[in-house]
Image (spheres, grey):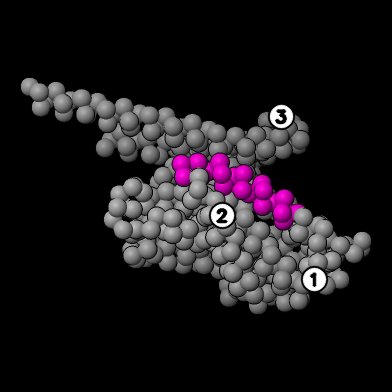
Amino acid sequence: MNLKIKTSYMVPLFFLIVNIIGFYFSGLSGGFLANEMVNRMSRNLILVMSLLIPVTSGTGLNFGIVIGAMAGQIGLFFALNFKIAGMLGIVVAMLVAIPVGVFFGKLVAIVLNRAKGNEMITSMILGYFANGIYQLAFIVLAGRVIPFREHMILNSGSGLKNTMDLISIRKAFDNLFFGDITKLPIMPLVFSAFLFVLMYYFYRTKLGQELRSVGQDMGISEVSGIDVDKTRTKSIIISTVLAAWGQIVFLQNIGTLNTYTNHEQVGLFSVAALLIGGASIDRATWKEAVIGTFLFHMLFVVSPAAGQRLFGDAQVGEYFRVFVAYGVIGVSLILHALQKRRALKVVRIDEIKSTETNIS
């Protein structure tokens, strides 16, 4: 038990130390850092949350949430096309994203159910494949086959504009009710907390219990009468819709939509955040999601400034930031692999001792 307590927090503790060192060398003020962290937590928590249910159901870290992000952007395209502004535009985008996300999630689940045991690499490749179809649809077909209004289309007559201004809905959700008082994005945090509570009670429903059972052992679940593929499909659909909503919340905070690139790093960064929080490919809770999102995005704030101050070159700071972004998953997976190996060794030692006791 003591070993478990020590190792389960090894990853977040490591990155907490890195963050403290980075903050010390960054020269940033505590007030600036706190403000940045509130903003980053509010716009990224739902994206990280979308990974939790697939982990519970045994489908691992779903890099395919990038496809959910595409569904969210399609919802925003709909709102922008009809010039629906303010909070109504965000609600409409979320409503449109639901059927699109369900459809995309169903397609992803069909593939992942045929690739049991290799879901993570499969979902990653699916994200690249879906990105190709997305580019084809909105570069070539938009304006010709897919109807969009003139203000959405490039001057050539086909293809959506590379960058879309979301000024009509920018921070409409952030400023809802509390914006004039606090000047902070309170409502997205409240919404995220509400979704976490819903997820807590969802795990206590029949479907939630089935998801847990499938995640623990698919063979026993199937013998128990649970439709494993159908249960896994539901988990992927929920994950995809949550990712779509998370992308909408993210983009309304940013205020700009890069049509062809905004979704590409969603899976990478969300998985990295969850792993930093202490999660693994077969265990993740809301605590790991919150802690990991905080630590990962704090690293994003302090690392460029720290790199610049240490090396005296702004470009070096950016290189350091890229290194951190892409290296964090590798470091996390290595640390988690070491934890798993150590835990397995402890189990084997206990089994040997038990056998020797029985023999004697």
Report if residue 118 is visible in the image: yes
Classify 253 as above or below 52: below
Depth check, front residue: 117 or 155: 117
Q: Which residue sits at x=80%, y=61%?
A: 141
Question: What's the mark number on residue 147?
Answer: 1
The amino acid at mark 3 is Phe
Q: Which residue is mark 2?
A: 108
The residue positioned 60% from the left and 34% from the top of the image is 327
Q: Residue furthest left?
A: 360
Task: Provide residue 187's location: percent of width, then percent of height.
Answer: 55, 68
Question: From the viewer's perspective, is 141 left or right of 360?
Answer: right
| Left or right of residue 348: residue 131 | right
Q: Which residue is mark 3?
A: 311
Earlier in the chain: of badge 3 and badge 1, it is 1
- Choose between 337 and 221: the one closer to the eye: 221
- Whichever of labels 1 and 2 marks the residue nearer the N terminus, that label is 2
Q: Is residue 42 visible?
A: no
